[in-house]
Amino acid sequence: MGRERGMQGAWLWALLAVAVAISPAFAEVTTERPGSILFFPKVIASGTRDTIIQISNVSNSMVHAHCFYVNAALEFPGEPPGLNNQPRWQEVDFDIWLTKQQPTHWVVSQGRRVYPLDPQCFPGVGECNDAGLDPGRVPPMPPDFVGELKCIEVDSSGAPISGNHLKGEATLVVTTKDTAPGGPLAQDPDDVGDASKYSALAVVGLDSNDANNILCLGGGVSGDCPNGAEYNACPQTTVLDTFASGPATPLQLSASNPQLPLDSFVSTELTIVPCEEDFENQSPATVVVQFKVTNEFEEPFSTSISVTCWGNLELNDINRIIFNPATAGSRLLQTRLQPATDADPGIVVIAEEFHHVPGLGTARAAYNAHTIGERSTADVITIPEGP
Amino acid sequence: MRLGRSVAAVAAGVLLVGVSLSRAEISSDRPAAIVTFPKLIVDLNRGIDTMVRLSNTSQSPLRLHCFWVDATPRCDNGPGSCISGIGIAPTCAGTCVDNWTETDFRLTLTGNQPIGWRISQGMRDCLSTSQTDPSQPCFPLDGVTRIGPGGQSNAVSRIPPVPHDEFVGYLQCIAIDDNGAPVERNDLQGEALITRTDTPLPLPPAAIDVDSYNGVGLSAIPGTNDFDGNLCLGGCSPGKCSVTKSQSCFSDGDCPAGERCSVQCQSNPSCPRGPEYDGCPNILVLDHFFDGGVDPVSDLPVVTDLTLVPCTQDYLRQNPEKVTVQFLVFNEFEQRFSTSRPVTCFKEFQLSNIDTSFNENSIFSAAVNGTLTGQTRIRGVADDKSTHGQALMGVAQEYRCAPTSTLDNCGIVSTAAFNLHSQGRRPQADLLLLAPE
């Protein structure tokens, strides 16, 4: 009995030690932290732009990741969308592995081959793109690719784990090259080399991961998620500060970037990806997204839109009235996005601003959205079962 | 025995899940009570200005106390300017002397209101501004001619311009109440947009570039703020004495004789109640192109600019904080290099100038590393003082340069700013010391 009490006491001390050890780590500077699932919502390799993916391992152990491209390009990219020209929502997956603290990168249109004799960088040699320990074979994406990339930390057998060892960035660059044979070159030579960069959204894994192929982001215990949440939940609300989108009227000149000429204007693209994804059955998730907009006069507006699998929307495509500077009556807008109901999947969002100066060119700047709260219902990512 | 173990195991599970779920969600960005913009720059002759956007994510008005910190070195014994950076050469004919000057101001954001201003111009209410000049954003709800739907306004708000042209420095904004005391409201978010034209307005530009990054937020921890001018960022949370549960402690020595404290850490006399805000990270992680590496998409060479600001700020005594910074660099072969550099108050440097002035031989150059990209772990070295944590915050900017550029002379084609990642916390608190109201 005395021994039992001793054991219970030891357990309680262990509990306390764990709680003390864990509690200081609950929140940090709210820029970016490593995680176990990386979302790159906006990936483009479409002729005039290409994307460089950077991923690194922030741990001192080897890390494996299973990555999924989702190609959301139209079946016939040059044609308008319609019943006979739907997005492909085609998934392609591959594995990477990173040694201790190893960074790696690849260009989406080129992928990365495994070739130990890739030339290294040294003075006078510019071409050293593939130098380094190759992370695995990364397939090149087709020339008209637009879509997303997800990378999930797994163990050496391919089972998902909550290591929280991955971080990443995507850089969208206006290319000098024509990635589409016979396709268009960069629209404006002055834009060539213009780059915008964002950090991948990292979902932190929890200790409750059961390592099966159903990944539960937030939520409680359910049939799919017998352990409850295995990863942190997707955000409840996403908050964006944006310029009103599009050219202003002559009476509404104060709508653009105030440092650029009067005839300049800003358009903003939002890339929205549902948190829920079924890679096993290739069934795209659909979410109705509510937008609540407040202008500088504290005047509220709202609208909604449906997004299936992947959406890249200019603000004026979402609503031609409330995001327009003439009708919004304001240079800046705060926009809150959230799924319309709890039954809708959660979303992750990336914003990219295009500062246009007619006759001169366009400057691009991507940025991560702010988020508030976490969803109470689970979002489930189902990955294909292993061998 | 088995039951005891089961109960303990279930309790452990519950505790772990409970603690785990209380952790932060997706590690993107969140509104916070303190927001810092580590790099702001104005150089109007070169067509460079920064627009700051702030917004209140709550429906209640949010009062802010903000600090411009002018970190532009002063040019002594000669004309010219000491502002420098990638694509900007100092013109000072004398000697550049480090400078650190703080200017503070207050403003109110109404419910869910976004605002934005050019830091070279500041922001006033629209009544006293020429509203026909679109380059001068103003506070729209002046409280006299216009108020918001809920009766809120921007009255008693005024943002001064930065003290001079050719400015480099940072901005920090803290949520306060009407009496000026810090409040636990995580309702503030913001972005900085650095715009470059190659000519000063109103001359028509021949090229434009815009990059943006998010303000770095520190969240208030509910129920911990003592509303004084010592703002405790992170550090050790107090525990409880083993018998006298009502007594909080940082170590056994704080408890009555024979009792144990549930935590063991060094107390900080400035933070008797422990942390009031999230702590700054133990390590900043930067993924970057090595300087001189060629972007495989644009075929343009890339260099990276890093700005670091210590988390501890003494606005009360105007004491600039000095931190020794360790840089640990890994290339794509997992080969490791390291270097260190002191940072006082604010430091902006091109990566390949951290360890040497001869960029080609730097451990941050592609030619030395042999690979295109690297990971750099940045750590402020903690000293033996318990009064501050020596942690850092920062932001990076990637420059794509003209093909004919050299490593020390980038002809800027485009820029892209991005926030750094962070890892871990440290037991020491950092402090923001404010002047009493």
Image (cartoon, grey):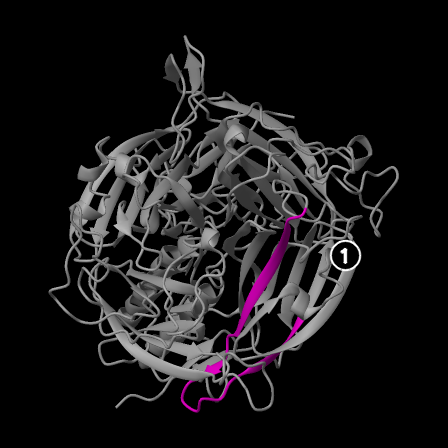
- Among all residues in the image, which is located at the extreme left? A117
- Residue at 34% x, 39% y is B410
- Residue at 39% x, 24% y is B90
Q: Nearer the viewer, residue A383 or A21?
A: A383
- In x, y percent, where is residue B26? 48, 63
- Residue at 74% x, 66% y is A302
Magenta span: A263-290
- Residue A382 visible here: no
- Residue B179 visible here: yes
Q: Secondary structure at mark 1?
A: helix
Q: Which residue is mark 1?
A: A328
Q: Nearer the viewer, residue B69 or B362?
A: B362
Image side of residue B73 versus residue B53, left or right:
left
Local crowd size for mark 1, using a 10 Å CA cut-off: few (<14), some (14–19), many (≥20): many
- Residue at 88% x, 39% y is B145
Looking at the figure, which quarter contains the N terminus of chain B?
Answer: bottom left
Q: Nearer the viewer, residue B108 or A243?
A: A243
Q: Main secondary structure of the magenta part?
A: strand
Q: Is B416 rendered above or below residue A44?
A: above
Magenta stretch contains residue B194: no
- Among all residues in the image, which is located at the extreme front? A182
- In x, y percent, where is residue A173? 41, 58
Magenta stretch contains residue A277: yes
Question: Given the image, what chain letter belongs to the residue carrying mark 1?
Answer: A
Looking at the figure, which quarter contains the C terminus of chain B?
Answer: top right
- In x, y percent, where is residue A3? 26, 70
- In x, y percent, where is residue A374? 56, 67
